[in-house]
Amino acid sequence: MAIVERPTTLPELPPGAAVTPRPLGVFTRPQATTGWRSWLTTIDHKRIGVLYGGAAMFFFLLGGVEALVIRAQLAAPGQQLYSADLYNQLFTMHGVTMIFLVVIPLGAAFMNYVMPLQIGARDVAFPRLNAFSFWLFLGGGLFLNTSWFLGGGADGGWFAYAPNTGVVFSPGHGMDFYALGLQMTGIASLAGAINLVVTVLNMRAPGMTLMKMPVFTWMGLVTQLLLVFALPVISVALFLLTFDRLFDANFFNVSAGADPLLWEHLFWIFGHPEVYILILPAFGIVSEIIPVFSRKPIFGYPFMIFSGIAIGFMGWGVWAHHMFASGIGPISVAAFSLSTMFIAVPTGVKILNWMATMWGGKLRFTTPMLFAVGLVTMFTIGGLSGVTHAVAPADTQQTDTYYIVAHFHYVLFGGALMGFLGGMYFWWPKVFGFMLSDRIGKWHFWLILIGFNLTFGPMHILGLQGMPRRMHTYIADYGFEFWNMVATIGSFLIAVAMLVLVANILVSWRAHRRNPVNPGPDPWDARSLEWMVQSPVPPHNFDTVPTVSHLDEFWHRKYQENADGKVVRIATGAEVAQPGDGTGVHMPSPSYWPLVLAVALPTIAYGLIFNLGIAAAGGVLVILAGFGFGYEPSDDPEAHGPHGPSGDGHDDGDAHAGDGHEDEPASEGEADGGADAAGGEAEAVGVGSTASASDEPATEGRGGGDG
Amino acid sequence: MADTAIHGPVAGETEHGPHSHATSTGISNEKLAMWVFLGSDCLLFGALISTYLLLRHRSISGPVELRDPANIFDIPFTSVSSFVLLFSSLTMALAVGAIHRGDVRRCRVFLCTTALLGSVFIGGQVYEFTSFVREGLGYTTNILGSAFYTLTGFHGVHVSVGIMFLMAMFVMSLRGRLGPDRAETVEIFGLYWHFVDIVWILIFTIVYLIP
């Protein structure tokens, strides 16, 4: 990538356009729309969604291999396949990877791809910030995993209780990588969350009131709001840990008077909302899948929404149930026991509503539907064992046993991951333009269901028998042998199931290559707006932004009541769908800056660990990239082509430069990271542009009007 | 959550441009993003302030006289610098008012004044930190030192970032690129600046004034 000084002469503009020279040299605006380069600079929410999905599956492979290595060690008593120290690193990195680098980004993948489509927008509110979020997430994830080659991974458990994770007890660099890596993925998630909150609140199609939004979009909104408020707390905790470890601060230094509960509180105040951040997107996906394959609208839509919101609120009041064994006192224990039992109520509402949606429906058990039902059943098991944790005396027994491991795998694997896999089969044709094989998909589902239950079901028993978690081996004759062997066999069955998924993708893709069959815009006879555009989705999403008058707008355009009050089909999905003609629609140009900014932050992080000079260089790069990002016009005049810019936008980028640089504080690693760019982007999509070229400068300037 | 009416043509007007400039809430994307970000930042300072409150009287290492915050702070000095920062909120508000009236020149003057006042505050903080260090309270001396410098340091970084913004806007204004059409940019920045000031009022009260 060469830095090219922009010529000060701009191409011809229509009269009246404000032409001012660019204040800073910037990259030439990337133009490619195909090839790997276009993926590096893309700011299209759909491509970014695909990138999130791909990256998450890559990390899933890493975390999965770690899990298999753990299960191999535990297959038989007294094994010494590797050291206890390496075991610590493996289970820590497995947890961190699966939570922060797989489930959160899988949620981000679906929300990035689907939410703008479901609300009838052309892109997210700040497309470049969106790209920045992805690259920084990827940078943080890779940074975290390079610790394997630079002295060993983190070894303090995914919740990293300080002072156990201080330099004294964890002298390697692993926990530094943990703290800084999660700091970066946190900044990425925060920037993404602000972006998506604004998108959903501000860029809905005309007529789409909040109570006409699809359930998935609603759950996405709740998730993003949880992220907005939960992430700064973990950011602070991670900063304190980083300062302790790198600069000898005393936050967790007990000999200086520190309180070990500080970390636990900070971590779990983030950590419990985090649990809902992980599961709510999957709940949303299932709430899309079940109505489609039951041919019924979602049962009790408002209850679905409000129970989601209730979960979001109550999720803030239950964190100390993770700390029943830490001595927080009987009153706290009683209060948090109660609140934990209460939070089961809205979750139960959701489960009952899904069942009521299926009740009396015309059920089609396609692969996505199987996964959705899988979530409902497996999550219920996990939810029930969760309620048993609310009973503090029982929880005191179960703390740090395999019972806990069983519980959270039932909610995260049986819940979140099942939902995401279902969503993958559901939206695959929309994203890639070909169907995944339903036959192989069913194999995938049943293998994973059996493998999953074989792996984690026995852990309930092991836990109740008293097998402690995080121990790298166990002694024979405690009665742990049989169920551990079963769990190990189950885990390898899960691995086989995931290979079946890979095979399915390859087989289906090759079949599609040999004999291309476009599934059409609406392969499932679905309900929401994303099915109203062609598959794969054209870059501009909607030719014209639809006006919404119903929940399940697309369905209502296909079906109406006839004179007898019977619902009949009046049009096919293909007839209702838009043809995908983007003439006159004006999209913002790709940009290098998000990538540059995202590379700068890991540079700082490596520098903090190994050489402060490198960190300083990274800091300078962040400031420069922040200015570049902020001053870059949202639009490249050369990219306008025939549609012509109506004089808008050429200096719009600068207009907001003031806000754009708020990124800089990232040099101090602060949550601001991308947060803001708030203004930095006066992007040209969504709210604005339409097909009619005569529109006044429709494309831009929600911020400040046009030049 | 305000679900205000959708602006623009609604009924049956799909063919025409949907809501050209309007957003669903009526608040611009940039401004809404700033509000959401500030909400998030509240939690950042909330966590830092809680940490400070938890730790400030717990020091059991280092010199005895440095364990009690009351022995260290110079309240008159910090009151003056706090007043300077609060005054900068006034000039910021005047800058926003000026740009809304279309008075670009006065806006520029007030932006510059705000930046200067902010810099005076930061200068005061630097002076304060150095004098504390000279008295023996380093970052690693005891828990109080770690907690105090981290909390006030985070605030200082926020102010410094704000000053960078102000300078950028000042330069833009000099180059004639911060006209009345960009009033909202100034206004959005103003939100940030006032927020940082409010946080300082909290910190000053909690850290310095309440014993």
Image: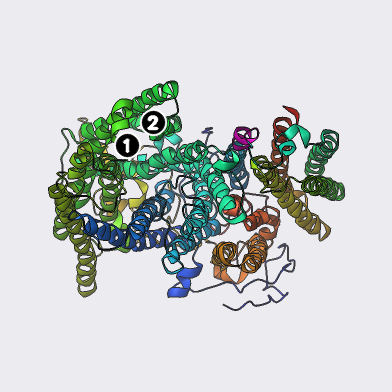
Q: Assign the C terminus of chain A to one quadrant of the image.
A: bottom right
As drawn, is A600 to the left or to the right of A15?
A: left
> How packed is label 2: few (under 14 Cα within 10 Å), some, or many (20 or more)?
many
Q: Residue at x 29, y 59 (%)?
A: A64
Residue A60: image x %, image y %?
Answer: 32, 59
Up/down of A703 relative to A207, above or below = below
Please, is residue B12 above or below residue A248 in the view?
A: above
Verify whether residue B51 appears in magenta. yes
Circle 2: element type: helix
Residue B155 against residue A179 in the figure, above or below: above
Q: Is residue A557 visible?
A: no
Query: Tags 1 and 2 in contact by the CB under 8 Å rule?
Result: yes
Classify the position of the N terminus of chain A by image quarter. bottom right
User: Badge 2 sits on which subunit?
Assistant: A
Stretch in magenta: B49-58
Q: Which residue is mark 1?
A: A399
Query: What residue is at 53 percent from the left and 73 percent from the top?
Result: A31
Residue A127 is covered by the magenta coloring = no
Question: As rendered, which of A325 and A145 lies closer to the eye?
Answer: A325
Disc 2 designates what residue?
A: A324
Q: Is any atom of residue A473 visible in this view?
A: yes
Magenta segment main secondary structure: helix
**Amino acid on which disc 1 is placed:** Thr
Please tell me which residue lies in front, A196 or A483.
A483
Drawn side of residue A350 relative to residue A682, left or right: left
